[in-house]
Image (cartoon, rainbow, N blue to C red):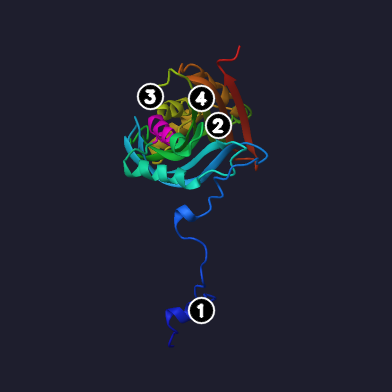
Amino acid sequence: MKLPNKSARHALFGSVPSGPKKKPVAKEKMQDLQNQHGAYLFPIQSVGVSNVKYPVHVRSSLEPADQQALAVFQLTSSLPSSVKGTNMSRFMEELEEARVKGELAADFDSLTALGQRLIERLDQQDVQIRMEFPWMFHRTGPAAELGGINHAEAAMDISFSEMSMTRKASMTCAVTTLCPCSKEISEYSAHNQRGYITMDVEFNERFSSTLDWKAELLEAAETNASAFIHPVLKRTDEKMVTEKAYENPRFVEDIVRLVAADLYELDYIDSFCVKCRNEESIHLHDAYAEVTIDKTAN
């Protein structure tokens, strides 16, 4: 079979020659619709770019200490009613410049520097940055001590203006939970489930960039569950893990209260929300609980 050449193939599927072009090609002669000023009904609290995937450096107090992750960014600022639109490309330009300079990392110092540059570049009064990324940590079995890599889903939020700044973080990690009711009523055995604990926290001025909040939140979640999740388990490990779960039964209500107690004791956290969702092994539905605490409230 003899194929037509590439140009003919493109024409076959609808491509047409370029026509005459009358609009300007020089930037200074192009009309800037986004930057038009007028009365555009309402101010916008948040406008920018989202679902932006970029590589970031992740530092960890747990092994592996230095990681690379593919993060998902949302970069926004407010917009007054007198301006038609924001300049989307400037968000991306600043993000790329930070990457090229090696300044893009999963820490609040990096996000603060990026936010300050965005405020200047956008000529706005505020900026909001959200970064979501997978965080890896090494976990060994309790008996055979064979290890592997687990992961948790982490996120960081920073919102600041010339007058104030808030720093928030979130983590979702997996645990094992064993039903106390099942253990109580059954002659033998008890059903268990995989639970997902989510912790949303807001930091105060006592928070330091030297603190690894990821490891702190992971410990608060895992140590209050029935048992840890492990990437590698031999028979000797499995015996210990299942017995530990049986010795530490937990309802979802128990989980959120116990995790909340650990977070409450961290003096660099002002407020938090703890959620637990258990994928039930004997039901089609999930079990769910949530608690929110503001330590600054009277």
**Dot 1 amino acid type:** Ala
Q: Say which quarter of the image contains residue 40.
A: top right
- Furthest residue toward bottom: 1
Q: Rounded to the nearest whole Å, what is the CA distance between mark 1 and mark 3?
A: 60 Å
Task: Identify residue for label 1.
Answer: 11
The answer to if 210 sits in the magenta stretch is: no
Q: Position of residue 192 (x, y in %)?
A: 56, 35
Task: Identify residue for label 2.
Answer: 178
Q: Rounded to the nearest whole Å, what is the CA distance between mark 1 and mark 4?
A: 58 Å
Task: Assess whether mark 1 and mark 2 are in contact (beta carbons under 8 angstroms).
Answer: no
Label 2: element kind: strand
Q: In front of the other: label 2 or label 3?
A: 3
Label 1: element kind: helix
Upstream in sequence: badge 2 or badge 4: 2
Label 4: element kind: strand
Figure quadrant of the N terminus: bottom left
Q: Rounded to the nearest whole Å, what is the CA distance between mark 2 and mark 4?
A: 30 Å
Which of these two is toward me, 85 or 236? 85
Q: Rounded to the nearest whole Å, what is the CA distance between mark 4 and mark 3?
A: 14 Å
**Dot 2 amino acid type:** Leu
Upstream in sequence: badge 2 or badge 1: 1
**Dot 4 amino acid type:** Glu
The mark found on residue 292 in the picture is none
**Dot 3 amino acid type:** Leu
Compared to residue 96, the image places residue 117 above or below, namely above
How would you rate the neighbour count of disc 1 (Cα within 10 Å): few for under 14, some for 14-19, many for 20 or more? few
Q: Position of residue 217 (x, y in %)?
A: 46, 27
Task: Assess whether mark 4 and mark 2 are in contact (beta carbons under 8 angstroms).
Answer: no
Task: Identify residue for label 4.
Answer: 202
Question: Which region is colored magenta?
Answer: 106-117
Q: Position of residue 245 (x, y in %)?
A: 50, 30
Q: Say which quarter of the image contains residue 14.
A: bottom right
